[in-house]
Each structure stands twice: as structure tokens, then as C-alpha cells.
Amino acid sequence: MLINTAFDFAKTAGLRIIFAGILIAVGFKIIKILISVITKSLHFKKLDIGVQGFLKSFINILLKIIILVTAAAVIGVPMTSMVAVLGSAGLAIGLALQGSLSNIAGGIIILMFKPFSVGDYIDNGTYSGTVTGINIFYTRLLTPDNSRVVIPNGNLSNQSLINVSA
């Protein structure tokens, strides 16, 4: 009797787990192909390099989360509890990374509105120099005395700055 119960459980739960594993494996392969197609598209190549890297990682993580949540639903995890866990985790991560999220938001603002670009000479009141790189978290400057300054994008997007090259 115990063997029959274990066998019935293995049939139902085992098939769900196998199907979820197949879903994850196939889903991750499809995501890899999709990311490759997106990055090779002509519209994507026209974007700034910083925006390309950010979008690529954002799309990759978002699609993988969707695949994992779908696999959990296939196994039988209740979706209400899954949504509650994801919401709580998102809130906790958001609070823990508050400064970093400020830098990400500042990076998005800089990359979208382009108050300055690579090669411009800027002065934010504290540092001045030629912009050598803009990524999603930080902007790099090369000062006149050949010092390299890394400024968080949150600071640059929330302060006044002078773009001498504009």
C-alpha cells in the first residue's frame, strides 16, 4: 500500500518536475537565442553602448524570472504565494540597493536625455574633466592633470553641471 502511494506520487509529481525542468532548459535556450537576435538587430546596434549592455542584461533577467515562475506554477506552487514572495523580494532588494537604484535611474536619464556625451568637457562643481565613459552606474572623467574620476550617475543627474563642450 505504501509502495503504491509512493508510486502514484512519483508519477504525478515526478512528471511535473520533469516537465518543469524541460521548460527551464528549453526556455533558457530560447532566451539565449532571443538575446542574440536582439543584439544583432540594426536598431539595437544604433543604441549607445551603455544602453545596449543595460537592456541586454535587463531583458535576460526579466525573461529568466518569467521562465522560473512558470516552471514553479507547473510544479504546483500556488501563484498567489509566488507573487507575494516576488513582491517582498523586490521591495527588500529595492530598499537594500537604494543608492545603486538611484545611480541606475541617473544613468538612464543621462543616456536618454544626453546632457553630455563621451568626449565632452564637463564641470559639476566638484570635479571637471573630459568624459571618457558613461555606463549605467558611473560616469568616468579624465581631469586636466590626468587623474581619472569616477562619479556616480545619481549625483550627476541630480546636480547642476556645466557642459563646456556644448
Image (cartoon, rainbow, N blue to C red):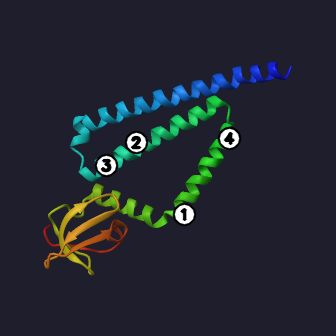
Q: Earlier in the sequence, mark 1 or mark 3?
A: 3
- Residue 158 in the figure: left or right of residue 96: left
List the residue tagged with mark 4: 80
Alpha carbon separation for disc pair 1 and 2? 22 Å
Label 3 sits on a secondary structure element that is: helix
In the image, 111 versus 11, the foreground residue is: 11
List the residue tagged with mark 1: 95
Q: Earlier in the sequence, mark 1 or mark 2?
A: 2
Residue 6 lies in what quarter of the image?
top right
The residue drawn where x is 28% and y is 38% is: 39
Alpha carbon separation for disc pair 2 and 4? 24 Å
- Residue 92 in the figure: left or right of residue 4: left
Marks 3/2 in contact by CB < 8 Å: the verdict is no
Residue 42 lies in what quarter of the image?
top left
Vertically, is 100 above or below 85?
A: below
The residue drawn where x is 34% and y is 50% is: 54
Q: Tag 1: residue type?
A: Leu
In the image, 58 versus 14, the foreground residue is: 14
Alpha carbon separation for disc pair 1 and 3? 24 Å
List the residue tagged with mark 2: 59
4 or 3: mark nearer the eye: 3
Q: Earlier in the sequence, mark 2 or mark 4?
A: 2
List the residue tagged with mark 3: 53
Label 2 sits on a secondary structure element that is: helix
The residue drawn where x is 20% and y is 61% is: 117
Q: Residues within 10 Å of mark 3 (few under 14, many from 20)?
A: some
Q: Earlier in the sequence, mark 4 or mark 1?
A: 4
In the image, 98 versus 27, the foreground residue is: 27
Q: Tag 3: residue type?
A: Gly
Q: Residues within 10 Å of mark 1 (few under 14, many from 20)?
A: few
